[in-house]
Image (cartoon, rainbow, N blue to C red):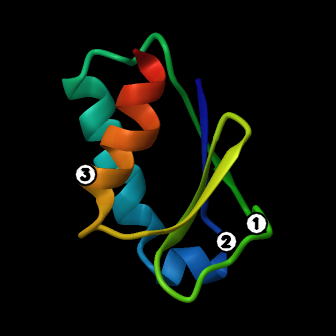
Amino acid sequence: MIIQICVGSSCHLKGSEEIVRLLNERISESGLQDEITLAGSFCIGKCSRTGVTIQVDDEIVTGVTVDGFDGFYNKYILKKGE
């Protein structure tokens, strides 16, 4: 699985640094380090007014926030990995 997190100026201001930290932490806790490639992207082209844009394989998810991170992770990372 390839996860690309937008780290462009808009997403950076919306918390991409914290989302990257949470992803690293959760991927490690879940033991998925060998199954996931985590990468930064300067712009995925689907900016949202709130939150960060993340691409999981071919699926683009917009508006990911620290508060909504658990829901994102469970739906797009854990369920895809099953």
Identify the amino acid type marked 1: Cys
Q: Nearer the viewer, residue 70 or 39?
A: 70
Per the rendering, the mark at residue 8 is 2
Query: Vertical placement of 30 versus 23: above or below?
Result: above
Q: Quadrant of residue 39?
A: top right
Identify the amino acid type marked 2: Gly
Q: Secondary structure at mark 3?
A: helix
Left or right placement of residue 70 versus residue 76 in this view: left
Query: Vertical placement of 77 versus 10: above or below?
Result: above
Q: Nearer the viewer, residue 69 or 82?
A: 82
Q: Tell me where residue 50 appears, x and y as whole percent.
A: 48, 84
Identify the amino acid type marked 3: Asp
Tell us which disc is closer to us: 2 or 3: 3
Q: Are marks 1 and 2 in contact (CB under 8 Å)?
A: yes
Per the rendering, the mark at residue 43 is 1
Q: Tell me where residue 31 appears, x and y as whole percent.
A: 27, 15
* Outermost top residue: 34
The CA distance from mark 2 to mark 3 is 22 Å
Q: Residue at x 74, y 39 (%)?
A: 58
Per the rendering, the mark at residue 70 is 3
Q: Residues within 10 Å of mark 3 (few under 14, many from 20)?
A: some
Q: Quadrant of residue 10?
A: bottom right
Label 3 or label 1, whichever comes before in sequence order: 1
